[in-house]
Image: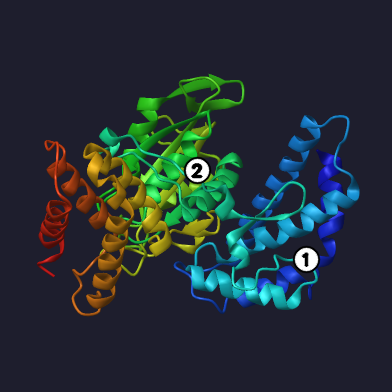
Amino acid sequence: MLQIQRDAATIMQPYFTSNGLVTKALEHAFKLEHIMDLTRLRCLGSLFSMLHQACRNVAQYNANHPDFPMQIDQLERYIQRYLIYAILWSLSGDSRLKMRAELGEYIRRITTVPLPSAPNIPIIDYEVSITGEWAPWQSKVPQIEVETHKVAAPDVVVPTLDTVRHEALLYTWLAEHKPLVLCGPPGSGKTMTLFSALRALPDMEVVGLNFSSATTPELLLKTFDHYCEYRRTPNGVVLAPVQLGKWLVLFCDEINLPDMDKYGTQRVISFIRQMVEHGGFYRTSDQTWVKLERIQFVGACNPPTDPGRKPLSHRFLRHVPVVYVDYPGPASLTQIYGTFNRAMLRLIPSLRTYAEPLTAAMVEFYTMSQERFTQDTQPHYIYSPREMTRWVRGIFEALRPLETLPVEGLIRIWAHEALRLFQDR
């Protein structure tokens, strides 16, 4: 592993000079819009985590192919392209898709590293395969079919370009055991994406905590008491999960809701920062330092511009990669709700052929309505894919007891449920 890291460092050295690619991209990133304040330390911390993952990928490849380990020319191809991929995500992961594409175009202008040739697809829509080739994320999105009875289930995840891309990114930082924050509007699928990524890692136990304006460090201490045990060792007191070999992941939902005290500090956030920075906390009951083992923090929140939200401090943010999860676009919505509609219309075989036009009508109406009634007009005009989910579930509940239904009946149910959801706007 050490030799791989040395070789990778030699390959990347020219890109880290004072006039190199990383410095130029970092300067450009500060001109873009970000969902939270951008700090150099956070960008570089995220970048080095991802580059560490690249070295781990190479080590894994060599372990799987002991007779044909990766040659230096293949390593150079892979590392150069992976560096571009890592720069894009670490510098613009907390920006909207348009900003990510803009940074990609800037990198395309200033680098000699071979990039994907398709002109109308942004670089952010590609990943780097271990062979050093650019592979479109779209090819990784599996086509799944949902069972009919699961249409109303809350935990069904339909993979889309965004979920597949975000899960791979989260996987990188979770495997590094770095804390991270997902930020995005309500209903954009932050919690769902995170839990889906955590389920892919076998040694993680997730505990969900819902933060509010009144949350204090005591909530974290009570959670530790419940899921962890304190052990006295020759090196002092250690706090670790009860299950051996398992990591405890504390998922802090709405992490930017806690109020500030009179000194302008969010105490619970400062407490998490201390545990991340120093690897433990000071227990006041018996004046001892408690060292944390196999405990990790992840958070999710709405943008700090939303009502009731507080901006997270730079001291905390410098330790945490931030990923912006936006609402799915029309293509992703069609993929998600097309899957649900196909499953739902299996209830009435004569209507099965109408799944595609039904989905197209739902997505078109939803996007037109979203563009027509914006939050600038009225603050409560919030549209999220949750509306679409309620719409599908409403139609499903109406169809479930029926055995036959003409297509006119389906259209009437579709319109009735739409009115129920959207009429009061």
Q: Residue 18: x and y, percent?
A: 79, 73
Upstream in sequence: badge 2 or badge 1:
1
Circles 2 and 1: CB atoms closer than 8 Å: no
Of residues 96 and 398, the one nearer the viewer is 398
Residue highlighted by disc 1: 114
Question: Residue at 42% across / 49% down in the picture?
Answer: 299
Decide if residue 173 is in sight here. Answer: yes
Q: Residue 216: x and y, percent?
A: 31, 46
Question: Residue at 20% across / 80% down in the picture?
Answer: 377
Circle 2 residues within 10 Å: few <14, some 14–19, many ≥20: some
Circle 1 residues within 10 Å: few <14, some 14–19, many ≥20: few
Residue highlighted by disc 2: 275
Decide if residue 178 is in sight here. Answer: no
- Three-letter amino acid code of the residue under disc 1: Pro
Q: Residue 139: x and y, percent?
A: 58, 51
For the C terminus, the image quarter is bottom left
Q: What is the distance, in whole Å, between disc 2 and disc 1 at their CAs?
A: 41 Å
Secondary element under disc 1, as helix, strand or loop, is loop
For the N terminus, the image quarter is top right
10 up-or-down from 1: above or below: below
Judged left or right of residue 150, residue 117 is right
188 up-or-down from 1: above or below: below
- Three-letter amino acid code of the residue under disc 2: Met
Judged left or right of residue 305, residue 275 is right
Q: Closer to us: mark 2 or mark 1?
A: 1
Question: Residue at 18% across / 76% down in the picture?
Answer: 378
8 up-or-down from 13: above or below: above
